[in-house]
Amino acid sequence: MIKPDVDISLSESKKTETNPFLYKQKLVEIKQSKHPAVEIYTDGSKDKIKVAAAAAVSNHDVFSVRLPDEATILTAEAKAIQLAFELIKISKDTYFTIFSDSLSCLQSIHNMNIDHPYILYILCNCLHASRQGKIGISFGFQATLEFTAIVKPIALQNLHSSLKL
């Protein structure tokens, strides 16, 4: 299995102790160091009882889903990355960067932890996508206000507008 390209360098500095401008500058450096790619932002959200996941691509295509109430935040974050692969499948582009604010999820992908079924699914999708010619899939840790502004409202909307049947 091909080991995914995972960059978690933004997690090296504590968010509470780092100037947001420095985060943005580092993010720009990371983006410039990679092949130009379609950016997909993901987020899993959980309130007191509801759980949802969302993925948004830079051209405004969005997938979101409500998850079972008992789902963990790791499951929600991993499901959001799965949704990113749904966006990749319908795209004609070949290079993608998936941004997530879940360090634990990205570490699981990087370490190829197949104990969690959604992480296994993500790893299998990386392999499948590379076989389909979508060769430039990388993952990046993104914990800035811009990221939150893009995806968090989508996941929260799904939390508050979905009824569990």
Image: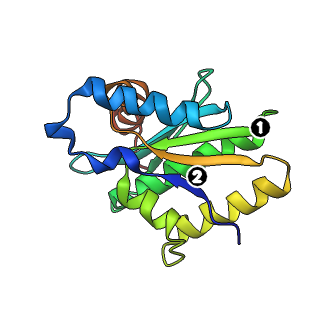
Amino acid marked by disc 2: Gln
Amino acid marked by disc 1: Ile
Residue furthest to the bottom: 115
Q: Is residue 155 above or below residue 21?
A: below
Q: Is residue 118 above or below residue 150?
A: below
- Residue 94 visible at all: yes
- State the SS at label 1: helix
- Viewer-closest of 88 and 27: 27
Q: Position of residue 53 (x, y in %)?
A: 45, 45
Residue 141 shows which numbered tag?
A: none
Label 2, on which residue?
Answer: 82
- In the rendered view, does 54 fall on the left or right side of 144? right
Residue depicted at 37% across the width and 24% down the height: 146
Quadrant in which residue 16 is drawn: top left
Q: Position of residue 155 (x, y in %)?
A: 41, 36
Residue depicted at 77% across the width and 49% down the height: 135
- Residue 69 visible at all: no
Q: Position of residue 138 (x, y in %)?
A: 60, 48
Label 1, on which residue?
Answer: 90
Upstream in the sequence, badge 2 or badge 1?
2
